[in-house]
Image (spheres, rainbow, N blue to C red):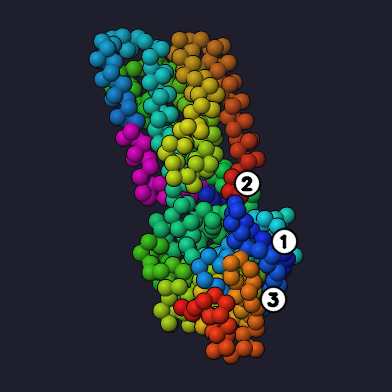
Amino acid sequence: MMREALAIARKDLVLEVRSKERFAAMVLFSLVVVLAFRFAFDLFGIHEQRLSESHFLIPPVLWATVIFAATLGLLTVFSKEEENRCIDALLLAPAPRSALYVGKLISSFLPFLAIAMFVMGFLAVFFPYDFRGEYLAVAGLLVLGTFGYAALGVTAAAVSSTSRMREVLLPVIMIPIALFTIIVPSINATSDVLNADVPGALGEVRVIAISSVIFVVVSMLVFDYLWEA
Amino acid sequence: MLEIRGLSKSFGARKALQGIDLSVGTGEIVAFLGPNGAGKTTLLKVVSTLLTPTSGSVRVDGFDVTEEPEEARRRIGCVFHDFMLYDDLTVEENLAFFGRLYDARRSGPQLDALLDRVGLLHRKVDRIATLSRGMKQRVALARAMLNSPRLLLFDEPFTGLDEAAAETLRSFLRSFASSSGSVLLTSHDPRLAHGLAGRLVILSQGKVAREVRSGSIPLETFLHDFRELVGGVP
């Protein structure tokens, strides 16, 4: 199963590197969102001095931007498969269809993680914010959070991929489930790390990790049935 | 090679296939004919495991497509109306990818031999988007042959092909059948099907309206019957 999953992930990444459509859109979008937050804070009189000292404002900005950009990316997870009905050729493979899920999870997670790192960079440049030097811990949370979001998102993208209302359907399916399992715990964990509350952060990490495992297991179990007509 | 018993497929209230019974032996070419909406493509999709039957059974080389779909898929090659190829990958990259996916990894020389067989070796580094429809179909045929299938499913194989390309394809299919492969194809053109297939099955409104051996019926008689059953010859 892993051989097929890796073949799908590799093919997706080759197509992404070749076209750069999805990744470029996500980078530009996240840049715009970071700048929008920056101007909004200026308008409300929250200036550089306060931003650099506020360890509660940055985590929601970081995660809102990452989640918005990742959601944009999820809209096109199956778009290459819809061209020429390539999805049928994938479904004809003599392998469990969960291989398709794992392949798409890998090829979604890696660009999302790269985007998350870009967003950290944008915040460091435009706010500017130094993450109190906790770059590694915040990066670790981004790895975990984006993985969990991708684990849920690929299945939601598969569910919505055949709908003409996919742009509306995908966030409607995803956000309510992700809100208290991935998004809020990720924001809290990042705040805890920036405020040196390690036990608090570990509690939130546990929620994200358990949620991610549940998303992966359930998705692998149901993925076969998503394509049944 | 293929056993279909009491096959029905419904989409909601619409019955696309009703009580289809059919056996396809090794080395046989069987053509399903009928107007648009007769159920030809639905039948191929059920046999290929892309759709599940509403009732009845389909066995490919002894494997039930519902109970053991992965084993059935190992024995099937498919060329459908959409060629199922990635436009932004080259011919070679498409085949290498599907080879890995279908557990049929081929070395460079083996892929070259396969491309040579479909007459596209000289275009192997070109992206699919740059190929003509006929060439794309030949790449799709090469992809379908990657796992050395025993049953080839071909949806409307002659659509959009010029006479030379159609003759090349006919030769390919005859050669495949003569080397112990079986072919199930659909067509809306009874003349082309009569010249190629050993058995002709006319579908109408999801049911088998007539089944004949092409050698047992002259073309004109068959065209007359076809006209009577489905109301016209394209």
CB within 8 Å, label 3 to label 2? no
Identify the residue position indicated by label 3 in the image: B26
Magenta segment, prevailing SS (helix, strand or loop): helix
Q: Give how far apart the Cα atoms at labels 1 and 2 are.
A: 20 Å
Q: Earlier in the sequence, mark 1 or mark 3?
A: 3
- Circle 1 Cα neighbour tier, 10 Å, few/some/many (<14 / 14–19 / ≥20): many
The one of A171 and B169 positioned closer to us in this rendering = A171
Residue B68: name its quadrant. bottom right
Label 3 amino acid?
Answer: Thr
Magenta range: A9-29
Side of A67 relative to B185 (left or right): left
User: To which residue does mark 1 refer?
Assistant: B57
Q: Position of residue B106 (x, y in %)?
A: 56, 63
Amino acid beneath label 2: Asp
Label 2: state its secondary structure: helix
Numbered disc 3: what chain? Answer: B
Residue that label 2 marks: A224
The percent position of residue B6, horizontal first and vertical second, equals 72, 64
Q: Are marks 1 and 2 on the same chain?
A: no
Q: Where residue A157 sits in the image (x, y, percent)?
A: 50, 40
Q: Is residue B151 above or below residue A53?
A: below
Element under disc 1 = strand
Disc 3 residue crowd, few under 14, some 14–19, many 20+, Cα 10 Å: some
